[in-house]
């Protein structure tokens, strides 16, 4: 039961994040590198830049795709490093 609860909490957070859109202020003030890094690092999410671009386009703001992807690559690389620690080669 405890294992189920530990798995359910991150899944619920991901679902909630997927439903929440970016506001105009979020889009204008976004640190695209950090946002990409966070997405790659937390749970090894696939890049979400297209979703952010659609959300921000509604507010007339262009997403910083290049910065996002640079951050995502760094975050995902770190995620892979952390999850593979202790794993046999």
Image: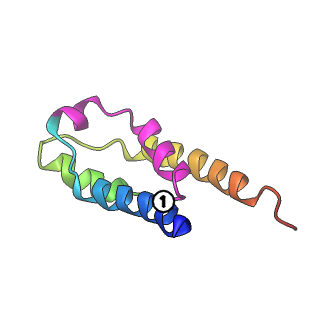
Q: How many marks?
A: 1
Whether residue 38 sits left or right of residue 84 in the image: it is left
Residue at 50% across, 65% down: 7
- The quadrant of the image that shows the C terminus is bottom right
In the rendered view, tell whether residue 82 sits above or below residue 87.
Answer: above
Disc 1: CA contacts within 10 A as few (<14), some (14-19) or many (>=20): some
The residue positioned farthest toward the front in the image shown: 1
Residue 78 locus on image (x, y percent)? 65, 48
Residue 50 locus on image (x, y percent)? 32, 58
Residue 77 locus on image (x, y percent)? 65, 52
Residue 42 in the magenta stretch? The answer is yes
Name the residue beneath numbered marker 1.
45
In the rendered view, tell whether residue 58 sits above or below residue 27.
Answer: below
Say what secondary structure mark 1 lies in: loop
Residue at 45% across, 40% down: 67
Residue sitting nearer the eye, 85 or 63: 85
In the rendered view, tell whether residue 6 sits above or below residue 53.
Answer: below
Tell me where residue 87 sits by quadrant: bottom right
Residue 14 in the magenta stretch? The answer is no
Residue sitting nearer the eye, 18 or 13: 13
The residue positioned farthest toward the top in the image shown: 29
Whether residue 78 sits left or right of residue 35 in the image: it is right
Residue at 55% across, 67% down: 3
Residue 72 locus on image (x, y percent)? 51, 49
Q: How is the image coloured?
A: rainbow
Residue at 23% across, 58% down: 19
- Dominant SS of magenta comes to helix
Residue sitting nearer the eye, 1 or 4: 1
Q: Which residues are magenta?
A: 25-47
């Amino acid at each position: 039961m405890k294992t189920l609860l530990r798995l359910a909490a991150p899944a619920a957070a991901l679902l909630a994040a997927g439903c929440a859109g970016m506001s105009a202020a979020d889009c204008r003030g976004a640190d695209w590198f950090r946002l990409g890094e966070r997405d790659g690092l937390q749970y090894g999410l696939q890049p979400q830049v297209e979703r952010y671009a659609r959300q921000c386009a509604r507010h007339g703001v262009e997403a910083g795709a290049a910065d996002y992807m640079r951050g995502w690559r760094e975050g995902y690389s770190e995620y892979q490093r952390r999850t593979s620690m202790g794993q046999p080669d």
